[in-house]
Image (cartoon, grey):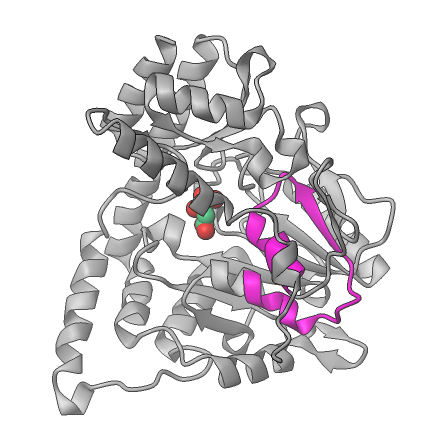
Amino acid sequence: MLQLNDNYQKLPGSYLFSTIAKKVAAYTSAHPDKTIIRMGIGDVTQPIAPAIIEAMHKAVEEMSVAESFHGYAPDLGYEFLRNAIVEHDYKARGCDISMDEIFVSDGAKCDSGNIQELFAPEARIAVCDPVYPVYVDSNVMAGRCGTYDEKTGMWSRVIYMPCIMENGFVPEFPGETPDVIYLCLPNNPTGTTITKAQLQEWVDYANKNGALIIYDAAYEAYISEGNVAHSIYECTGAKTCAIELKSFSKNAGFTGVRLGYTVIPKALVFGGVSLNAMWARRHGTKYNGAPYIVQRAGEAVYSKEGKAQLKEQVAYYMKNASLIHDGLKNAGYTVFGGVNAPYIWLKTPKHMTSWDFFDYLLTEANVVGTPGEGFGPSGQGYFRLTAFGTQENTVAALDRIRQL
Ligand code: MLT
């Protein structure tokens, strides 16, 4: 009889955002008269910028003519997009990254889940706690995390680096040396970040200990402070210890369009083996590339008009972030984040658990957020709100919360 991958059976419950969607659906079907404001999943609400829509229309037209039709995309992505990425995301920041170190994909979520295929089953991973659930769940599926303790909410083989109010949400070097370190900065879910000098310490630590950093820079466009790195390759020595994941979802509203890329420097070599070559082999075998139309849309993100329009979009969401941050603070909440990231992280009031506060907010204010505990045990007693809503809904949600 077929033997299944029983690591899947070890996963507790369903994916965090699926659980929340189910809870909200149950509430709305029982209370069809209520208007729900969604500040849970970090999904964007502003339409795709005009310069990008124009590029997509043009690409659609090209597909209708034999001479300009495009079939399978090149393995690593079209050169026009990889070139724009190199010029704008790296060269412009003084980072020496070349086109053949960029792998275009249909989004950072898939890449962050798939990248663990490169590591041995014995590899020990270290994660910030709380953390974007994909990093841990995908390693559980691969049998790398040991057993789950329901009481502590922890996996026996995962190294947790608590990021809590007491340490300013800055991960500390773990007692045990990990093989792979996941860092998401600016951080999802806490909305906080670390300075470039602090990131340099992580790069030095990884190089010294022979560890690999998976650096998720999905929220890079939201950085407002000058001492924060936009790419890990701004740090000296990062090319020998770090992979960087980038998304077009949050900076350009592509959550439904799907586009991202992963940077694997050629200098990234472990045990004499190039990770760039391994990922190229994997990419070529398992993936047929993001659609031509979408890659043209990605290219337009870097055009003069595209950049200006997206700057406005990011400012729109960050206005929401400061409204939520200040509004909650004035209402007596303890709040973090929202300065370099579109997430606000708050302490639940009256020592409520994260899920109790979720239910309370849903039923009493008809506002949906994300319970901190869903991101890991150190998220207990915290709650996340996203700034990706419309300004009208953000203001309305704050009014409702203030009246609680
Ligand atoms: C989140 O809400 O944490 C993100 O939207 C999830 C994602 O980017 O996949």
Q: Quadrant of residue 64?
A: bottom left
Q: Position of residue 116 (x, y in %)?
A: 64, 66
> Is residue 355 visible to us here?
yes
Residue 221 showing in the rendered view? no
Q: How many marks?
A: 0
As drawn, 26 above or below 249: above
Residue shown at the point (31%, 52%) measured from the top left: 307
Q: Nearer the viewer, residue 99 or 125?
A: 125
Q: Give the percent coordinates (x, y) of residue 373.
A: 59, 34
Residue plotted at (27% across, 20% down): 396
Q: Report the residue at 80% width, 60% height from top.
A: 207
**Residue that protrudes farthest toward the bottom in the picture:** 67
Image position of 199 with respect to 97: above or below:
above
Residue 384's spot in the image, x, y percent?
Answer: 49, 31
Taking 170 as reference, is 261 above or below it?
A: below
Write down the quadrant of residue 386 in the picture: top left
**Front-most of 136 and 32?**
32
140 vs 306, nearest the viewer: 140
- Give residue 342's position: percent from left, percent from top: 43, 36
